[in-house]
Each structure stands twice: as structure tokens, then as C-alpha cells.
Image (spheres, rainbow, N blue to C red):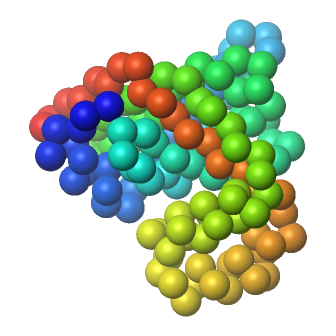
Amino acid sequence: MDWKPEVAAFLDEPRFGVLATINPDGSVHQTVMWYRRVGGDIVMNTRKGRVKPNNLDRDPRASLCIEDGQRYLTVSGRVEIDEDRERGLESMRVMTEHYEGAERAAELIRDEYANQHRIELRLIPDAVDAHGF
């Protein structure tokens, strides 16, 4: 994905997104997520065993909606899951630094995330719906 500069700047600011995945019964599961833009993709992180990665294992289709008042963006596509624990923990460190700063990230890695099996979710965009840009 080649992001327009104003959309890339919007994505690069710390915001919350709402990730939608598909439950086994066809209903939608939504989760508030941290995310970051890596090139043309959107990277997120979660703990192995939660509903969203289980849904994505079965059906990789997803969308992420990010809003800021009248400006919002919905990114739809397929998610690739990297279940490597060490890469997942490093990805979470980078994500946490982006949102909370280096000092807080170090604390959370040590006290919480190191005890979890963190995995990376990479949303590869098929479609983008941008408003207010």
C-alpha cells in the first residue's frame, strides 16, 4: 500500500483502532487495538490464545477502523500471523514504546509481557476507505 502523506502521518500518530474479525458463527468480533504502520502494512500485537488470533487462523479477513473526530480510516485486508514468541515480544516492545515511551515499555515487558506468548498480526491492506483527509 502506498499511503498518501496525510494518511501516513495520521497512522503514525499514537491512536487506537478497532479490529474486526469474523467469529465461527459469522458474527463480528471487535477489539480495541494498538497498531503501527510498517511500510504499507499495519502491524498489531496480541497474546496467543485470544479470540482474534483464533478467528484469524480460521479466516484471515479483517478490518481496522481508526478515528479522530471527523477524520477516520478503515483498512481492510488479510492478516498474516507470526507466532514466534521472541519476535512477538520484540514487536510488543516497539509498539509499547510508541504508545507509552521507552521507560514504561521496559517495565511492561519485564512485569507483564515477558510472561505471555505475544504474537504479531500483520494486516496487508486490500482496500482503504479514508474520510476527512
Give the image location of residue 62, x and y in percent. 56, 25
Residue in the picture at 58% in, 84% down: 104
In which quadrant of the rendered view does residue 126 lie? top left
Query: Is 123 placed above or below 106 here?
Result: above
From the viewer's side, name the closer residue of 76 and 39: 39
Q: Is residue 38 visible?
A: yes
Residue in the picture at 76% in, 70% down: 113
Which residue ends up furthest to the top in the rendered image?
26
Q: Is residue 16 visible?
A: no
Residue in the picture at 32% in, 31% down: 1
Count of numbered marks? 0
The C terminus lies in which quarter of the figure? top left
- Residue 72 placement, left or right of 132: right
- Residue 32 placement, left or right of 7: right
Query: Is 110 placed above or below 120 here?
Result: below
From the viewer's side, name the closer residue of 105 and 85: 85
Give the image location of residue 91, x and y in percent. 60, 61
In which quadrant of the rendered view does residue 53 lie? top right
Residue in the picture at 77% in, 19% down: 58
From the viewer's side, name the closer residue of 126 and 47: 126
